[in-house]
Image: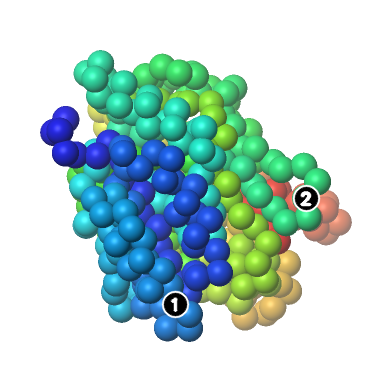
Amino acid sequence: MEDKQKILTVAIPCYNSAAYMDKCIKSLLPAQNDLEILIIDDGSTKDNTAQIADEYEKKYPGVIRAIHQENGGHGEAVNTGIRNAGGLYFKVIDSDDWADKYALLETVDRLKQLEEDGTPVDMFLVNFIYDKVGAKRKKVMHFRHAFPVGEVFEWSAMRHMKQTQYILMHNIIYRRQVLIDSKLVLPAHTFYVDNIFAFQPYPYVNKLYYLDVDFYHYYIGREDQSVNEQIMISRIDQQIKVNKIMVDIMAETDFRGRDRHLKKIMYIYLDKVTVVTNILMIVSQDKELLEKRKELWKYIREKSFAIWWHLKHTPLGLAERAPGRLGRKTVVKFYGLARRIMGFN
């Protein structure tokens, strides 16, 4: 590792984030000697996000960089972060979320140790917390029963993952070269692209490491937040777009000669995203959205009969063919699952 190269780049996409970005940025400063922090102002115009970013750059030269761009949405802000990153590893933290101080410091130390020991990894996993406003108990998404803890491992070491366990952008730290090798470019002006960020690089991951620390606080509570249930339904076209892109990635991945568990874990992710997409359209009871749901299944079948067959034989696929009350009851059950997966507010 070069002397001046930071172990980790953290990109913070900001769009009119003045009300909460301070908390996110300050949560990273305890590890500033080992971090490169990129504040990406995605064309903010309604507040002083750009000014705050510039002030942080002046106050922390060599640590924080402010990057200003025309509005391109969350995906384009992440793309900008990847293009400008200089660290060995790369992480995205949304501007309304934040990192736990002690988990951050332990994560940075472990990444450095892996490099010093000559055992670098492609994906580094931590825990994340659903920090939901008003919730008496914060839900922690951990993987101590699904992955080996505190050791380098491969996909084949994966154990059973619960339906509600979800590897998201929130708990992933990628080796930056993996993102480059996977040719990851997220679509602009599209919500829910964090699923593509997590999913597309999977085939380029061979070595993983899981540190059982509660690193990422995923804030849920703003009325305008993208995981607000009604907002998700209103943006269903973007959810469908992301779902289709993930189907494309799955269909175009050559699994020959790869760890057989890779395909399994990619299907787990695709299954869950497809559940959310379908359930949102079902509960909307909107005739137009129900037609779009049919179109989605048609798209999947035409893209890959094997993927369509797999998805149709998941519990969700079987539920839609169940008769009358049984079918409705099962759909309601999956609706509850979708809520837990997404942490709807």
- The answer to whether any part of residue 318 appears in the image is no
Figure quadrant of the C terminus: bottom right
Q: Sequence-wise, which precedes: disc 1 or disc 2?
A: 1
Residue 336 position within the rendered picture, expressed as x and y whole percent measured from the top left: 75, 52
Is 30 or 301 nearer to us in this picture?
30
Is label 1 in a helix, a strand or a loop? loop
Farthest bottom residue? Answer: 46
Residue 82 position within the rendered picture, expressed as x and y whole percent measured from the top left: 26, 54
- Horizontally, is 103 left or right of 162 in the view? left
Check disc 2 and report the residue beneath it. Answer: 135
Task: Please report the residue visible at 21 percent of the width from the left and 47 percent of the height from the top.
Answer: 86
Task: Please report the residue visible at 44 percent of the width from the left and 32 percent of the height from the top.
Answer: 105
- 10 Å crowding of disc 1: few (<14), some (14-19), many (20+): few
- 10 Å crowding of disc 2: few (<14), some (14-19), many (20+): few
Q: Amino acid at mark 2?
A: Ala
Farthest right residue? Answer: 325
Is 216 or 335 nearer to us in this picture?
216
Q: Amino acid at mark 1?
A: Asn
Check disc 1 and report the residue beneath it. Answer: 48
